[in-house]
Image (cartoon, helix red, strand yellow):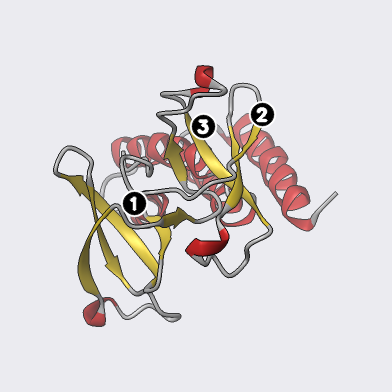
Amino acid sequence: MTADLYNENDARATYAKSIKAYGLSSILGIRSGLVFANKLLYGACHGLEAQRLVTMLTIDSRRIHGPGHHITINAEKLLEDCKIRYIKVYPIGRCQALRYENNGETCIVQGPILNPRQVDNEQIFHFTNSPVWPERGCPVFLHGLVSPSHLNNKVGEVGKFYNNKTLVPAHGVRFAVHFEDNTKLLQFGHKIYVKRLICLE
């Protein structure tokens, strides 16, 4: 069992115990839920599940404890983090996908993102037919698949990358996509382009 999986399962169990002991909308229950969501987002890279959980926790905290309570403020901050879609754009590097324009043909991104992040120094770029790669855990919307076609219009999360850690376009990119309904992994063996790939909702 990996450390990430252990932490995720441990946080899930703790959250369940907190709900049972203190209630779903209690401060301790919400705090435990935020810890669990943090493990989902940053440890297990399950952004979709994390975003749904934090959305529920934020609504409950705002309604029960008020918008100015520290637990509500923490929940809103984590929800903002859940909605960020990190991608790699060649040759710029790490960026944040903001939106699509031109009927999905153009992806608007902000970056490059440094560590620590310096938002004031980042720029806005417009990419059309440029190779981009969503980072692990990023929600993606599948379309245009010939085989297996039944996966079209499904939303999944990017999993493990294979064989091309440098993400050079000429080398191609292979990564897995995880689906919540059946945990199936799909490996891509071709270049991925911008059109409506990243799920920005």
Q: What residue type is labelled 1?
A: Glu
- Residue 169 visible? The answer is yes
Q: In this view, does 162 lie above or below 176?
A: below
For residue 5, side relative to residue 54 (left or right): right
* Residue 29 visible (yes or no): no
Element carrying mark 1: helix
Secondary structure of residue under mark 3: loop
Alpha carbon separation for disc pair 1 and 2? 31 Å
Local crowd size for mark 2, using a 10 Å CA cut-off: few (<14), some (14–19), many (≥20): few
Q: Which residue is drawn at 33% across and 56% down?
A: 73
Which one is in front, 53 or 27? 53
Apparent side of residue 4 relative to residue 99 in the rendered image (left or right): right
Q: Which of 89 and 40 is in front in this view?
A: 89
Whether tag 1 and tag 2 are in contact, CB under 8 A, the answer is no
Residue at coordinates 69% horizontally, 43% vertically from top-left? 14
Is residue 6 toward the left or the right of residue 99 in the image? right
In the figure, residue 46 lies in which quadrant?
top right
Coordinates of residue 69 in the picture (x, y in percent): 33, 53
What is the three-letter code of the residue carrying label 3? Leu
Residue visible at 33% across and 49% down in the picture: 194
The label on residue 76 is 1
Q: How crowded is mark 3: few (under 14 residues within 10 Å), some or many (20 or more)?
A: some
Q: What's the distance in space between the residues labelled 3 and 2, CA to CA? A: 31 Å
Is there CB contact under 8 Å for labels 3 and 2? no
